[in-house]
Amino acid sequence: MSRFYSHINTAVKLIGSYKAGSPLHLQLKDFFAKEKKYGSKDRKMIARLCYAYFRVAAGFKNKATIEKIIANALFLISTDPDPYLELLEPELNAQVTLPFNQKLELSGIELNELFPLYHELGKDVEPSAYIASLLKQPDVFIRIRPGKASAVENQLAENQVQFKKESPNCIRLSSGTSVEKLLKLNKEAVIQDLNSQKVFNYLSEHLELVSSEEPLTCWDACAASGGKSILLQDVVQRKMRLTVSDIRNNMLSNLELRLKEAGINIFRKFAADLSKGSNLSSDEKFAVIIADVPCTGSGTWARTPEQMFGFEQTQIKDFATLQQNIVSGILPHLKKGGLFIYITCSVFRQENEDQLAFIQQTGNFKLAHAEYLQGYESAADTMYVALFTC
C-alpha cells in the first residue's frame, strides 16, 4: 500500500509542475532519468495516473484537488476495481463496474464538460463518441510495406507478439506494444496510425487520369518525419522525383535517414517557413503536392491528452490562418492537371471543412474527395483529408 501512496504522491507532484503545451512523455522521461529509484513498473503506474488526470481534467477544473480528479479519472476509465481508486475513493471503486453513463452521473458532470470545445467539432464528427474516446489510449498500428507481409508476421509470431490484421497490409497491436527491436522499421514496416495509412486511398484512381509523367514529380511540403512520403511511394509504386520540406532542419535530417532506410531517394530537401513563402522559383511545378499541415492535433488527443490542458479556443483560428497562409504559398506550384492533398489530424471544422472553399478560391481547383477518417470508434486517430484536382 505504501508503494501505491508513493505513486499517487509522485503523480500529483508531476501534474502540479506540468507546463501546458509540452509533451508529457518528455517530462516523465526527464523526471525518471533524475529519479533512479523508480523501477519500470513504478514508472508505468505513475505515468498511467498522470495520463488519467489529463483525460478528464477539463470536466473538473477548479472543482476538485488533483487527487480527486485522478480518482474520478480512474473511476470513469476503469472497468474493474482499481487498487489506486480503492485508496482514494473506495465508494467509487465499489461502483466501478457500472455503465459509463451512470458513472458519469455519479461524478456530477456532463459528457460535454470533459471537452468544452465540442461545439467546434466538424459536422461529421460524432461528439459523444469522440469525447468518450478521449478516455482510452488508442492502439498501435503497423503498415507493412509491399512484399514484406510474411517477414513481418513471422517475426511477430516468433516473438509471441499478439496482433490482429486489419487489412492485408495493416496490423493492430495493443497500446504500449514495442516492436522497434523486432522489425526492420521503414524497410519492412512503418509504425503508422490506422487512419494515417488511409489518407491516399483515393489517390491512385485520380493519378491515372491526371498524370502519366515519369518520374512522377512530388512535393511533400510539410514532411515532418517522412511517413507520408514512404506511404506515397508504396501507393503509387512508380519512380518518383521527390522534394521534401519542413520548417525544422533537424526534422529533415531525421527524415533523410528514415527515407534512406526505406530505400527512397530524395531529389531535393529544404527548410522553409511555408507560411512566408517556399523560396521555390515560380516555374517549379509538381504533379502531386501533399500538405499535412500544422494543426491543433485534436484528432490525436486520446494519445496525448495533456495537449487539451490549457488549450484555448482562439488557437483553432490561429492554426486555421496558418494553414491558409501555407496553402497560399504551395498551390501556385501545382501543375495543370496535378493533384493536391490537404491533410490534418484535427477534428475541428475551422481547420477542415471551412478550408475547402478557401482552397478552391485560391485557384482553379476542383474538390474530388473529402472526408473525416474517424478513429474514435476504432481506437485510432481521427484524420481529415481532401483531394483536389487542378
Image (cartoon, rainbow, N blue to C red):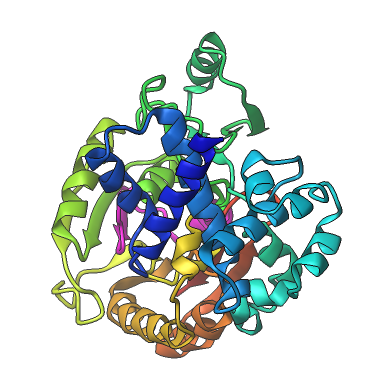
Is 329 in front, or is 116?
116
Q: Position of residue 291 (x, y in %)?
A: 38, 66
Farthest top residue?
A: 158
Whether residue 42 is in magenta: the answer is: no
Tally the numbered discs.
0
Is 175 in front, or is 237?
175
Q: Look at 20% across and 69% down and name the residue there.
A: 284
Does residue 279 appear in the picture of this structure?
A: yes
Does residue 196 appear in the picture of this structure?
A: no
Q: Is 35 situated left or right of 118 in this image?
A: left
Q: Report the magenta residues as a range.
A: 199-226
Q: Is 214 situated left or right of 57 in this image?
A: left
Is 265 in front, or is 195?
195
Whether residue 213 is in magenta: the answer is: yes
Q: Look at 56% across and 68% down and name the residue there.
A: 57
Residue 328: image quadrant is bottom left
Please identify the quadrant where the C terminus is shown.
bottom left
Q: Position of residue 305 (x, y in %)?
A: 51, 60
Q: Is 365 situated left or right of 30 in this image?
A: right
Q: Is 113 situated left or right of 146 in this image?
A: right
Farthest front residue?
A: 2
Q: Position of residue 98 (x, y in %)?
A: 86, 52
Please identify the quadrant where the N terminus is shown.
top right
Q: Look at 53% across and 22% down and name the residue there.
A: 149
Is 174 in front, or is 21?
21
Q: Position of residue 228 (x, y in %)?
A: 40, 51
Q: Is residue 355 above or below residue 176?
A: below
